[in-house]
């Protein structure tokens, strides 16, 4: 294994690489806070609102493998700067969207730009930090930058929403992208694989097509039930995925190195990342609405309530390498996932007299355990490949995480919507117009708006209380799912994530390097 230490310039470059990581998370957190405001301004349907939130993750997940792997061929710094320019432009367009469809389209463009940004940062780290211990610390800083974005996002977003229109939250990232475009060429090294073949357009199309159709089918099944269209979409996507895998097996320079999946530690690390983001994103959208529309907090107050969680989410990735040194990777990651599960368990208690404290405590525990575990498993994934393939493996790691987030919003968000609709239906007054009934069915914000238009004050109060109780119930159910899946994943990590064999500690052969990377 390499023992070459990184120069000082690499650590300066790490600070620059933290910028796009920070802003991609901010873009998600500020949007969740802005949901009630953009709902009032653009009046999206329930389905449109879900697409506004999760189209970013869907496109990002679908484009990561073909776009992220492109950095190995054209240059990772070059791809990073292209992504920064595109992200800044799309942010401006999103801020000034005039209808739900325009916002959905610009969020899709943001997802495509993010597919160039995030894996480029991680693959550059693999190039800049060859020493395993330094790379682990660097990935800890990299992971903490996402948490910093999550910490800053609610505070900045809440402050902006107090004084400006909802679109202002998208403009936060524009100056950061400009700074990245200026500083990137100065402090970041360029790296490309000189032996890489030409990009395979067929593989790219198969990758995007399979992910997009499968995710769309799953989303529609959860939302509308098992009908022929989503079933056909899912089956078609699985067929495209099979063709993609078959093609990778025949190519001399495949887009995705399938031999990585022969290692159980790599597989469980990838699955852990996906599960972690799945439950996190699926729950956060409900928490943000619960704080503002049930507890009555302002966006700024909701942002302040997230501060303990945000601070612990920053501390977790920074402390996790120290824990690994003391108790080893399997027990560290498993223990962190158990902490996240306890956090979800606390969130199942929302609705009582200590609701605000319950949310703050549960959120903080989940943020600490989940963020730290995700940082360590990301190190496992990125250390599993040689430097020349770091772009493709980084893209694969981010694909799992982003797909998990998109599915979390779609599946858990749609499950929450189904629970909400089922409970609200019984509280709708007789004789209400179909338009008002549909608005009340779609979102809690819609139900509150409809209640203000009902002349019968008793019926209006019943609708408000039922709608708020429905959202609380949905949050409890998703929190139970988060707790159970986190415990299951902790068990899998404890069993399959193993440190390198003793004979590999002093070895430099390729197999041992990969195994050592899996324990980083």
Image (spheres, grey):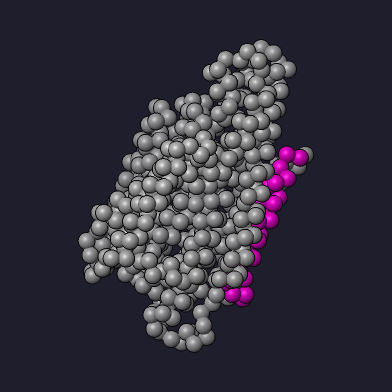
In the rendered view, tell whether residue 388 sits above or below residue 200. Answer: below
User: Residue, x 47% and y 68% (percent of image)?
Assistant: 266
- The dominant secondary structure in magenta is helix
- Give residue 40's position: percent from left, percent from top: 52, 26
Residue farthest to the right, as pictured: 353
Residue 284: horizontal and vertical position, in percent? 57, 44
> Above or below — where is 311 with respect to 231?
below
Q: Nearer the viewer, residue 449 or 278?
A: 278
- Relative side of 475 to 224, left or right: right
Q: Position of residue 514 (x, y in %)?
A: 43, 75
Residue 342 position, x and y percent, is 69, 56
Is residue 323 shown above or below 63?
below
Residue at 56%, 44% (x, y): give it.
Answer: 412
Give the quadrant of residue 123. Answer: bottom left
Whether residue 338 is in magenta: the answer is yes
Say which of 8 and 54 sits in front.
54
Q: Is residue 137 shown to the viewer in this render?
A: yes
Which quadrant of the figure contains the N terminus?
A: bottom left
Q: Is residue 176 visible?
A: no
**Among the 4 quarters of the image, the one containing residue 289:** top right
Q: Nearer the viewer, residue 306 or 193?
A: 193
Q: Magenta stretch containing residue 250, yes or no? A: no
Highlighted range, magenta: 326-352
Is 321 or 465 nearer to us in this picture?
A: 465
- Residue 490, by quadrant, is bottom right
Residue at image point 61% right, 69% down? 494
Report the label total. Answer: 0
């Amino acid at each position: 294994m390499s023992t070459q230490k990184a120069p000082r310039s690499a650590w300066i470059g790490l600070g620059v690489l933290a910028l796009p990581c920070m802003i991609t998370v901010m873009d998600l957190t500020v949007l969740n806070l802005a949901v009630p405001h953009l709902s009032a301004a653009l009046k999206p349907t329930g389905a449109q609102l879900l697409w506004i939130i999760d189209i970013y993750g869907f496109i990002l997940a679908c484009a990561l493998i073909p776009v992220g792997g492109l950095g190995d061929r054209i240059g990772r710094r070059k791809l990073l700067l292209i992504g920064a320019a595109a992200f800044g432009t799309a942010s401006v367009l999103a801020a000034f969207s005039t209808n739900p469809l325009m916002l959905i389209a610009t969020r899709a463009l943001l997802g495509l730009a993010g597919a160039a940004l995030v894996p480029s940062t991680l693959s550059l780290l693999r190039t800049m930090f060859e020493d395993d211990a330094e790379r682990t610390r660097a990935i800890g800083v990299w992971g903490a930058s996402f948490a910093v974005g999550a910490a800053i996002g609610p505070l900045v977003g809440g402050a902006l929403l107090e004084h400006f229109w909802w679109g202002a939250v998208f403009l936060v990232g524009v100056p950061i992208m400009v700074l990245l475009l200026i500083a990137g060429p100065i402090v970041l090294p360029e790296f490309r694989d000189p032996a890489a073949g030409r990009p395979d357009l067929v593989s790219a199309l198969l990758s995007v097509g399979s992910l997009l159709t499968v995710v769309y089918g799953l989303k529609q099944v959860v939302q509308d039930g098992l009908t022929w269209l989503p079933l056909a979409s899912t089956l078609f996507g699985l067929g495209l995925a099979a063709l993609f895998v078959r093609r990778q097996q025949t190519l001399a320079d495949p887009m995705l190195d399938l031999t990585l999946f022969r290692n159980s530690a790599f597989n469980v690390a990838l699955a852990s990342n996906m599960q972690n983001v799945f439950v996190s994103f699926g729950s956060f959208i409900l928490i943000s609405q619960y704080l503002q529309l049930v507890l009555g907090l302002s966006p700024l107050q909701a942002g302040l309530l997230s501060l303990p969680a945000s601070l612990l989410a920053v501390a977790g990735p920074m402390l996790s390498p120290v824990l690994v040194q003391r108790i080893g990777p399997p027990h560290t990651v498993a223990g962190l996932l158990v902490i996240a599960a306890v956090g979800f368990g606390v969130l199942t208690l929302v609705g009582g007299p200590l609701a605000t404290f319950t949310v703050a405590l549960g959120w903080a525990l989940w943020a600490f355990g989940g963020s730290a575990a995700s940082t360590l498993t990301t190190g496992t994934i990125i250390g599993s490949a040689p430097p020349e393939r770091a772009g493709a493996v980084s893209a694969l790691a981010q694909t799992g995480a982003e797909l998990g987030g998109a599915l979390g919003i779609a599946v858990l968000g749609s499950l929450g919507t189904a629970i909400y609709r089922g409970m609200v239906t019984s509280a709708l007054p007789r004789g209400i117009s179909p338009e008002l009934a549909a608005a009340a069915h779609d979102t809690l914000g819609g139900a509150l708006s409809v209640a203000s238009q009902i002349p019968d004050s008793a019926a209006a109060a019943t609708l408000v209380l039922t709608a708020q109780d429905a959202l609380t119930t949905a949050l409890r159910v998703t929190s139970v799912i988060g707790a159970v899946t986190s415990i299951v994943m902790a068990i899998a990590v404890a069993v399959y994530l193993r440190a390198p064999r003793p004979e590999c500690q002093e070895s430099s052969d390729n197999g041992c390097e990969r195994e050592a990377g899996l324990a980083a």
